[in-house]
Image: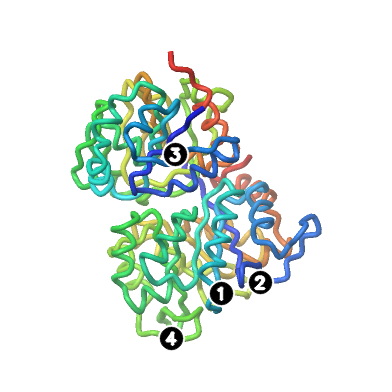
Amino acid sequence: MLTKRIIPCLDIKNGRTVKGVNFINLRDAGDPVELAKLYAETGADELVFLDISATEERRRTLTDLVKRVAKEVDIPFTVGGGVSSIEEAGVLLRSGADKIAVNSAAIKRPALINELSATYGNQCVVAAIDAKCIDEQWKVHLMGGKIPTDLELFAWAEEMESRGAGEILFTSMDHDGTKNGFANEALRKLSERLEIPIIASGGAGEISHFKDVFVEGKADAALAASVFHFKEINLAELKQYLKQNGIAVRLH
Amino acid sequence: MKVVLIDYGAGNIQSIQFALQRLGIVALLSKDPNEIRSADKVIFPGVGQASFAMKKLKEASLDSVIPELTQPVLGICLGMQLMCDATEEGNTKGLGIFKTKALRFNQNLKVPQVGWNEIRGLKSPLFEGVNEETYMYLVHSYYVPLTAYTIAQTTYGLPYSSGLRKDNFFGVQFHPEKSSKAGSVILQNFLNLTND
């Protein structure tokens, strides 16, 4: 049976993890590769690296990081952050990334999704969508959720699918950072309307939230950052809990 | 041992190269027919769209080279599907090694299938030391039905072939290079195969 995926997300700036992570057993907790290896060994099904650096060196630093991760980590990983052309995506994929997450660039130029899908296949195209519920309407936001657009979440997700996205990574700005659970209602609607898998993001605070996002939110995968980085949730315990609650997960 | 990774411009071959490096093997990336013919082991990767990949294979004349290879050959993901007679993806004619056709997953499933699923019914030296119901990482929208060549199966809506074998030709639908420790056992088993 296909299992539900648990995906730790690492924010990267200039080749280093951004948030002060709290792992005493790592030689260098700021090194994304060390952290990625630890997660892979303790039960992560995939990893996401989001690059938020804004320097001119960004591309080269990110490419170097992707190569280092691909060399040492034996599970799939997605890279996102400012990818806006098929050339840029190609460099990251050839360096060993499995998937590319595209967010603002797809809003500015939706045909990018068609181009990426036609060139590299839809399996490596993740359409990342940040949205916030305003007056009972889910509105897509740009630039990490700072700038609202006129796009409506569900229509936009369907457009991403029809243009060739292989997965949707939906972050609810209303839930992100709250630790009160995922946006299950919106997720369920996305999951029922789209044929491609949905990755839920934003709101994870305790292990029961992961059960809820799979059962109520019908998500195919759940992404979280700080609960893993700060050891509030242990990956192995989380997966045991999900299995005990009848959710198909990969144990090893 | 000379391991050649067929580099025909389709797919993420870097991951396979790194996975082999973790096993102590430096694979040669090549689309040169002579290099490929002289290898001890050949890995035929594939990620992306079938008709585009077939076009790339033809441009390098590899569509006639691959079916005539006599050493162990391992097709991965789209590589395995292209070793079949045909695939529904872009109505593409394949290399005709496995007499079967890749079909699209049923409409009421999430497509592509993305994630970890079990392999069962394992029957080849390729799976030595790998337990039944081990999880492997898969990403695909088309599947090969169960056939006489099936050496591993997985269920998604229906049981299908996640491993195929005919003589020296092996194919796996999953990505051993991305399937944690069990995946590297399968790659090591492939490297250990003898040509008999």
Quarter of the rendering occupied by the C terminus of chain B: top left
Residue corresponding to mark 4: A148
Residue type at tag 2: Val
User: Residue A28: x percent and y percent?
Assistant: 75, 61
Residue type pointed to by label 1: Ile
Does B63 appear above or below A115? above
Q: Tell me the CA gap for discs 2 and 1.
A: 9 Å
What colouring method underlies this structural image?
A: rainbow
The disc numbered 3 marks a residue on which chain?
B
Of residues A99 and A238, the one nearer the viewer is: A99
Mark 2 and 1 residues: CB-CB less than 8 Å, in contact?
Answer: yes
Same chain for labels 3 and 1? Say yes or no. no
The percent position of residue A183, horizontal first and vertical second, equals 51, 69
Badge 2 or badge 4: first in the primary sequence: 2
Q: Considering only order in the chain, which callout, 1 or 2, is on the residue closer to the N terminus?
A: 2
Is tag 4's residue or tag 1's residue first in the polypeptide sequence? 1
Work out whether A21 lies above or below B189.
below
State which chain disc 2 sits on: A
Tell me what residue is drawn at x 59 percent, y 63 percent. Answer: A9
Please check whether the numbered discs 4 and 3 fall on a single chain: no
Q: Mark 1 sits on what residue? A: A52
Q: Is residue A169 left or right of residue A245?
A: left
Q: CA distance from mark 3 to mark 1?
A: 32 Å
Label 4 to label 1: alpha-carbon separation: 19 Å
Q: Amino acid at mark 3?
A: Phe
Relative to A137, A9 lies left or right: right
Q: What label sits on residue B174 in the rendered view?
A: 3
Q: Which mark is residue A18?
A: 2
**Which label lies toward us, 3 or 1?**
1
Residue at x 44% of width, y 39% of height: B174
**Do the residues marked 2 and 3 share a common chain?**
no
- Quarter where residue A187 is shown: bottom left
